[in-house]
Amino acid sequence: MCYSHLSNLLIHNSPLSDNVLNAFMGRSDTSSSAAFRNVIIPNSPVSADVIDNLTKWTNILPVAISNEILSAQGINPSYRTLTTINREKSAIINQRQLVLNNTVSNYIEDDSLSYAISLLENENTEETNKILLSYYLSNDDTTSVKQKMNIIPVNSDENIKLLALANIELDLKRGVKNEFDIDSTQEAAIREIADDCPATLATSYAQAILSLVYGEEFSLACDTNVTYNAKVQNPGNNTNTNNNDNYYLSQNIPNPFSDLSFINYKLPEKCSKAILNVYDISGRKLKQYSLSMNSKTIIINGADYAEGLYLYGLEIDGILKEYKKLIIFK
């Protein structure tokens, strides 16, 4: 079949599959640049599986044709490809997620955490179930933990490690123990997960355990965790003995995050007012959250902030006790 006849046949049957487009580019030549353009434009924007091959061609095609093809990879209103549909689908999903985030944020600001949790439960997606698993672990809700463990699929390394951490927590609770009672085997497993790069929800949760038990802090860079405080020798209760006035502030989980992140805390019994402040990297206060003695978890909604690095600090009775870093990505 001659090249011109093939081109006309492909144009007539557009939009084409990724396999057909890649095969077409594999047998094309630069002498037929106009015919090449006539096939590619009705199939633009192309998918990620085709763009590498297409980029090679745009580097050798005449500049005018190359620019026209590249422009069609952004917006090509005359044609509707599968990539266009997928982009529209992603935009709708993102809009829905934004509405969900704003709703959860409103519930949290109104001190209606139970409504926020209920909303996340109704979502019933893999990601929300993992977030809820971490929340229930932090609040010692073993029944809900077991329920989430049964429905989170073992389909990724992250999920396997998150479930392994949950199993360690459940094993401790069966023996009426807490994180300060982990044995050497459990500690080794937690440290292996805490060192993972890039960071996942499981990584952040493992780091939070090590921060609670050993007072360790973790660098934002991979493979560079540094211990700043000595190991706590089984203090016998769920408090951080490095702090003289008996308070605790965890690393947010997950970190980095785009949607929701949980921060666990413990306040001194004689505390009259406690606030969690969020600062930009220059130290300017952006937002503050009132902390309750009756709760031990605060939820940060990523929709309230732009992408970037932030600091959050625990303020007790007007005194800033401790701060940590959090990262938001969009």
Image (tube, helix red, strand yellow):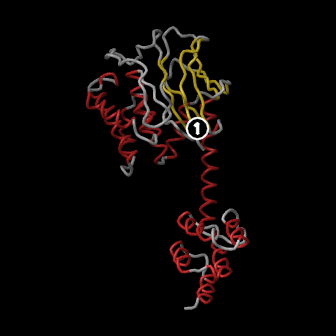
Residue that extends furthest to the bottom in the rendered view of this protein:
1
Measured along the vertical axis of the image, is residue 162 above or below residue 40? above
Q: Residue at x 55, y 69 (%)?
A: 53
> Mark 1 highlights which residue?
328
Q: Quadrant of the N terminus?
A: bottom right
Amino acid type assigned to the residue bearing label 1 in the image: Ile
Percent coordinates x, y for residue 58 in the rendering = 64, 69
Q: Residue at x 60, y 71 (%)?
A: 57
Measured along the vertical axis of the image, is residue 134 above or below residue 291? below
Query: Left or right: where does residue 208 sit relative to residue 313?
Result: left
Please name whichever residue, 263 or 40, is drawn nearer the observer in this view of the structure. 40
Please identify the quarter of the rendering in which residue 163 is found.
Answer: top left
Percent coordinates x, y for residue 179 in the rendering = 34, 25
Percent coordinates x, y for residue 288 in the rendering = 64, 24
Q: Residue at x 50, y 22 (%)?
A: 295
Percent coordinates x, y for residue 73 in the rendering = 66, 65
Could you classify mark 1 by the number of other residues whose Cα lies within 10 Å: few (under 14), some (14-19), or many (20 or more)?
Answer: many
Q: Residue at x 26, y 28 (%)?
A: 184
Q: Quadrant of the C terminus?
A: top right
Helix, strand or loop at disc 1? strand
Query: Left or right: where does residue 24 sit relative to residue 71?
Result: left
